[in-house]
Image: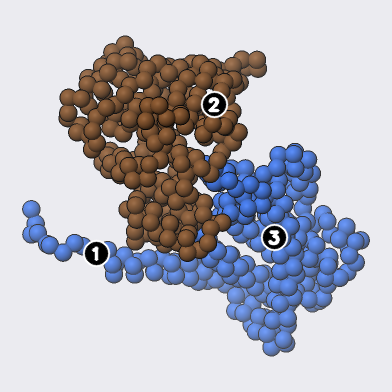
Chain colours: A brown, B blue
Amino acid sequence: MDNAEPLIRVRDTWMSFPGKASGQFVHVLENINFDIRPGEFVCIVGPSGCGKSTMLNILGGFLKETRGDVKVEGKPVIGPDPGRIFVFQENGVFPWLTVEQNVGFGLLSRPASDREQRVRHYIQMVGLTGFEKSYPRELSGGMRQRVEIARALAAEARVLYMDEPFGALDFLTRLKMRNDLIRIWQAEHKTVIFVTHDIEEAVQLADRVLVMSRRPATVQAEVIVDLPRPRDLDAPGYLETRDKIFSIMGMDAHGGGAGEPR
Amino acid sequence: MATVNSTPPTPTAPNRSKAAIGKLLLPVGTIVLFLFAWDIAVRISGSDLFPKPLEVAKGIIELAEKGLLLKYIVASLFRVSWGFGGAVLVGVPLGLILGWFRPAFQALNPVIQILRPISPIAWIPVAILWFGVTDAAPVFLIFLASVFPITVSAMAAVQNMQSVYIRAAQNFGLTGFSLFRRVIFPAALPQIITGIRIALGIAWLVVVAAEMIAVNSGLGYLIIDARNAGKRYDLVVAGMVLIGGIGLILDLLVRRLEKFDEVRWGYGQR
């Protein structure tokens, strides 16, 4: 797997936004370099406001880097692509459509029988069977995120860009969603790039964690999480990896440290 | 501790009947009180021109017997339907376009904001000049009165839309008309319906002024005619009561649109 062609290749990528005063710029990303291989689950962590979401939006084609070389599947990113679906923290499920209409949203060009079968399959995979005719407002936050994941999978996205998708959920729902996401990822062989500010979440999920620095952000470290799944959150390997990332970010796991919380 | 009851309490009968009381009894009670106060006030003042509620009711019956009641209501509703219907057909697409295409907004918004505050009454002479004393003149006035609120609400709905819907739609490869049809329009619809509801109220409000143009039917005409031909204030007030009552029914009808599953998400949880 190590010698496979990278699916995503980011080289010397910079991003600046215009500042409040004219002529001023806010430098968000600085000389970003990384590769992501097909089928990998990669988490990007970093302090809040560091630009990790910005990086994901560049990969997703919603933002254009100021300078750099961003290639996905060998081609420069020129815009959003149905083969690479973004899952939003604020939930992009369409509230005027039912669960099954949402999941089938990217499939309208397909024959009805094929569409129905895929919709049913992915609704079942995310555990929402029985809620096909429900509207998003009738579902909990976790269920709405499941709909969004099912919608991306049904459309045959090869890559999922997930921007703190569980950030708005309560603790127990978040744990459950992580387990289910790993199960789905293992079944579907997708490539997942998952942005989070939660280090524990990253270590529970990822094959590899990219740690970004404070703004202007660069990739400060790459931590390989070589732990068997399902992961034991009390195992020494897990705790060791977690503490390693904490210390890279200038904190220790027991609170405090050199880094400021925000 | 009190005795433990294993069946959970169900919030049923008392609450539900309470809600029913609030829904029907409160408004009806208020209206009855209002009619009572009206009657007393007229008696105390000793006015022989201003009618008591019962006289107004008799006036309405008189209109019905002459066959004018239905004729006038239909005439007014006919004008409002055409003027308001035209305003929906023009205002909704125009507002969606203005909300989405920035250059269109920049070009047209100032014109709309200049035309919007001009009262439809100010347009009466112009309407007569352009359309003469025909049904087209009041229809035009009603159109003018309702097209701006509809346009502005559709425009604001698109401009204030959560960007996550647009981004999700673009991610699935939607562009152009299908983006409009499948995402922008449904996302804007709840707010458009609110605009339509407000505009229908205004359209109905303007029908009286619009029928001041010498048409010879309609509830607005009834009011002007009853005043001019013999100071029949019972019929003047009857016209007012009818306008109010029909206005209430129209609003209740439009409100039903807000109950559809496709738009219910856009309104508060209450």
Q: Which residue is mark 1?
A: B10
Label 1 close to label 2 by CB (< 8 Å): no
Q: Secondary structure at mark 2?
A: strand
Question: Relative to the observer, which residue lies in front, B218 or B146?
Answer: B146
Chain letter belonging to callout 2: A
Q: Which residue is mark 2?
A: A70
| Residue depicted at x 36% and y 38% | A166
Q: Secondary structure at mark 1?
A: loop
Task: Determine whether B126 is above or below A249 in the image.
Answer: below
Task: Determine whether B140 is above or below B219 in the image.
Answer: above
| Residue depicted at x 34% and y 27% | A208
Question: Relative to the observer, which residue lies in front, B242 or A185?
Answer: A185
Q: Position of residue A238 (x, y in %)?
A: 22, 27
Quadrant in the picture for residue B85:
bottom right
Q: Secondary structure at mark 3?
A: helix
What's the amino acid at mark 3? Val
Chain letter belonging to callout 1: B
Q: Position of residue B117 (x, y in %)?
A: 75, 48
Chain letter belonging to callout 3: B
**Disc 1/disc 2 C-alpha distance (Å):** 59 Å
Q: Which mark is residue B88?
A: 3
Q: Position of residue A52 (x, y in %)?
A: 45, 26
Which residue is outermost to the front? A3
Question: Relative to the observer, which residue lies in front, B268 or A157?
Answer: A157
Q: Nearer the viewer, mark 3 or mark 2?
A: 2
Evaluate whether residue B222 shows in this view. no
Evaluate whether residue A206 shows in this view. yes
